[in-house]
Image (tube, rainbow, N blue to C red):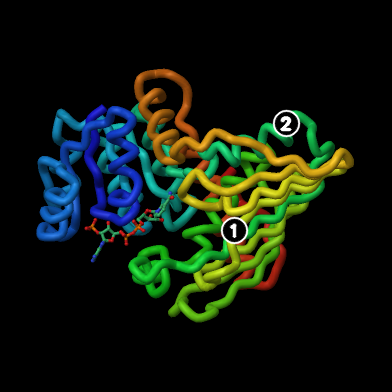
Amino acid sequence: MRWALIGASTIAAQYMIRALRAEGGEIIRVVSSSSERGAAFAVTHAIPLSGVSVEEAVADPRVDAVYISTTNEKHRPQALAAIAAGKHVLCEKPLAMSLADAVSMVRAAEEKDVVFATNHHLRCSGSHRAVRALIRDGRIGRVLSLRLHHAVHLPENLQGWRINSAVAGGGVIPDITVHDADVVRFLTGEDPKTVVAQMAASGLGKGVEDSVMSVWSMPSGVMVMSHESFTHPFAGTGLEVHGTEGSIFAKGVMTQNPVGAIELVTAAGREPVAYDPHDLYGEAVRRFHAAAAGHGEPAATGWDGVKSLAVALAVREAALTGAAVDVDYGG
Ligand code: NDP
């Protein structure tokens, strides 16, 4: 599969270029809004061509698929351009700035019959899959609650639009709560129903929130507690799932790398749980390539991206209004 990168981004540089190539993808061009940055990025990453025009890149007949990792407000127009040109799209989260925009992207892809995927990497991790298997195998009985700890310290090199630009889709809710919403949906097989939340600017956010705590109710009655932040250097991340017959403690697993430890606690005692430590992004690309070849669905579909965005938008609305908000999935 031949790829065009739309966005000379950190995530492309740090993870996705390697993942695309490791899975047999060929990256033939990169688009940046700056010709200088794009050219430098192309040289650094041995990409043959760079340019500033999305239209030109998606019109390239050699390009099969695009990976979009620009700032969030650009995802929709860039995805629509790629879809209109008949290219498959792997789009970063959050898919868009509004639910209607995200829905329009996924519908456009369906109409053009191209693959559209959301880059929710956590559901691709061996650790999250192991937790899901424990739940599915009934190892903790009936699930009662989940607690997600995803309060991290935003690295200095990423302290730009994420903490100071609402226009570019900054804030911890579109950045991390979307991932947690996808994790909860992946683990429980349910869509969160109602949320309450509080948010704050606790040291980094300028005009956007850098911390949020929220509680979600699931249709089955399962309760979810979720904490995301950019300002917590030593909190560590984790995921707990508590059931009538046991609890799962997955420490350090809300991350981009195949790390962390899982422990199952039941009446029989404490048991470490092994998992496959494959590359998270490589797995997402592997599934995308297969879907584009007509085999199955991508790991996270466009509709998964719509739903994670819907939850994040509900969390922000709940935090803004102080009211309990029913998640609007757009019908
Ligand atoms: P970056 O800030 O690194 O890149 C976003 C855009 O900023 C780039 O497209 C680029 O514009 C511009 N840019 C990059 N470096 C510079 C620079 N030195 N000076 C000026 N502008 C620059 O963002 P991320 O890579 O962290 O995030 C990009 C997208 O990916 C977001 O949508 C984010 O939510 C998502 N993401 C997803 C992750 C996941 O695990 N799924 C992890 C991290 C991010 P241009 O392309 O025009 O050159």
Q: Where is residue 256 in the image (x, y as percent from the top left)?
A: 46, 49
Q: Residue at x 62, y 70 (%)?
A: 319
Q: In which quarter of the image is the C terminus?
A: top right
Mark positioned earlier in the residue sequence (2 or 1): 2
Task: Rate crowding at label 2 as few (under 14), some (14 to 19) or many (20 or more) other CA atoms within 10 Å.
Answer: some
Residue at coordinates 72% horizontally, 31% vertically from top-left? 136
Vertically, is 103 above or below 22? Answer: below
* 2 or 1: mark nearer the eye: 1
Q: Which amino acid does label 2 sit on?
A: Arg
State the image coordinates of residue 203 (x, y, percent, origin top left). Answer: 50, 81
Residue 211, x across and y down, in percent: 56, 71
Q: In the image, is 73 to the left or to the right of 37?
A: right
Q: Which circle marks residue 136 in the picture?
A: 2
Residue at x 28% of width, y 43% of height: 17
**Rendered residue at 55%/37% (across/down):** 126
The circle drawn on residue 237 is 1
- Nearest to the observer: residue 61 or residue 42: 42
- Label 2 – label 1 distance at C-alpha: 23 Å
Please, what secondary structure does the residue beneath circle 2 have? helix
For residue 303, side relative to residue 241 (left or right):
left
